[in-house]
Image (cartoon, helix red, strand yellow):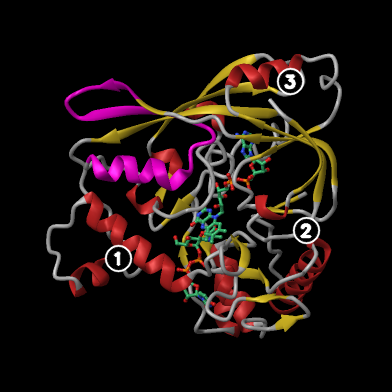
Amino acid sequence: MTILKNHSLKSYNTFHVDASADEFIEIQHKDELKEILLSKEYRNKSKFILGGGSNILLTKNLTDLVLKISIGGIEVIDESSKHINIRAGAGVVWHDLVLFSVERNLGGIENLSLIPGTVGAAPIQNIGAYGQELSDTFVNLEGFYIESGSYKIFDKQECHFDYRNSIFKRELKGKFVITYVTISLSKNSAVNINYGSIKSELKNLGIDAPTVKDVSNVIIKIRRSKLPDPGELGNAGSFFKNPEVSVERLAELKDKCPDIITFPGSSDKVKIPAAWLIEKCGWKGKRIGDTGSHSKQALVIVNYGNATGAEILNFASEIKKSVMDEFDILLEEEVNIV
Ligand code: FAD
Ligand code: EPU
């Protein structure tokens, strides 16, 4: 285990914000993690857990000890005629787990293809896309409480999964390190192609009976056409969550904007695309200095080069204020502000 001092985090966050960590350790094994959590030197020092850095905005240099979780390994731990349970290390790249599944024709996470980041961060906001969420296949996760170093397994119910949310983004925010995640994949599941343009893309390719791999390939194609590649343009995906409103509130909004777009929300609520609200407020494609709203996806805030975390946050706050003034809707950040 090497302890790096005054370490640059620029290549560890997909916004490519230039910030540093006073102390930085890469964790390859759960025993190393336990050792650090219980060590005399680091027990009482505050810690920040880092995965792939694709859902954080660094607004300052970190005085915490940064623990970059790189625990690897994908293993089949259980199998029946219908399902396979797979346990993956928190440091595994999420899309590598998707590819592992898709190559074996195992269904359940193919719609989550190409989401950046690590397996260990996937439960934090219950990653979701194109009609699937992690919670659909989730079995349990393992890890350690940061303060006490004690080990715990969380089953699905205990994680309190919700849209872009879980207990780890609320009550246990910054208090628990995930080391392993187990999911259950289906050997013969029907693919889920009802969301957005999946069906029409498959039709264009002449695919009538899509396999898990066909769906994954189409999702990759759609995502590449819509979202900027963080390798080329710094971003963290959707900056805000899509807000949910009551049916009564929607009726009022419809009076004002008959063209409003909606999706089903949780219980009796409706979801309004934040991208639509932001575009309506005139922000789509707008740039201030080195930050801006992406020209193809208004909800994605980008770093054109040397924007600071504070500048990006300030830009996001301006957007938030506009949407509040125009629609009386409070946008909530999806990205973790650090
Ligand atoms: P990080 O950004 O490193 O961390 C995120 C949070 O999780 C931080 O609070 C961190 O402290 C905590 N954390 C990380 N690892 C652990 C761990 N092992 N234990 C405990 N806490 C931990 N998200 C979606 O849901 N759907 C999408 O379609 C989607 N599309 C995206 C597209 C792009 C281009 C980008 C850049 C991002 C997108 N995201 C999407 C957001 C992001 O990919 C996910 O939130 C992802 O799960 C973040 O993983 P990460 O490893 O990069 O986490
Ligand atoms: N739209 C606009 N303007 C835009 C972009 C989109 O008005 O600039 C409208 C379109 O009409 C479209 C609707 O908004 O019908 C929804 O857009 P899109 O399909 O691109 O999805 P989204 O709601 O913006 C969500 C997730 C994404 C996920 C996609 C696909 C949230 C906050 N975001 O985006 O997740 O990949 O759906 O399922 O829920 C992320 O979390 O980082 C992320 C990228």
The spot of residue 300 in percent (x, y) is 60, 69
Viewer-closest of 214 and 299:
214
**Which dot marks residue 18?**
2
Residue that label 3 marks: 36
Image position of 124 with respect to 257: above or below: above
Q: Amino acid at mark 3?
A: Ile
> Image quadrant of residue 143?
top right
Task: Rate crowding at label 1 as few (under 14), some (14 to 19) or many (20 or more) other CA atoms within 10 Å.
Answer: some
Residue that label 1 marks: 198
State left or right for residue 155 relative to residue 195.
right
Q: Which residues are magenta?
A: 76-104
Viewer-closest of 270 and 122:
122
Image position of 325 with respect to 163: above or below: below
Q: Quadrant of the N terminus?
A: top right
Q: CA distance from mark 1 to mark 3?
A: 45 Å
* Marks 3 and 2, the one that precedes in the sequence: 2
Q: Secondary structure at mark 1?
A: helix
Q: Secondary structure at mark 2?
A: loop
The spot of residue 3 in percent (x, y) is 76, 30
Q: Amino acid at mark 1?
A: Ile
The spot of residue 127 in percent (x, y) is 50, 47
Image position of 162 with respect to 320: above or below: above
* Marks 1 and 2, the one that precedes in the sequence: 2
State left or right for residue 109 relative to residue 211.
right
Q: CA distance from mark 1 to mark 2?
A: 37 Å
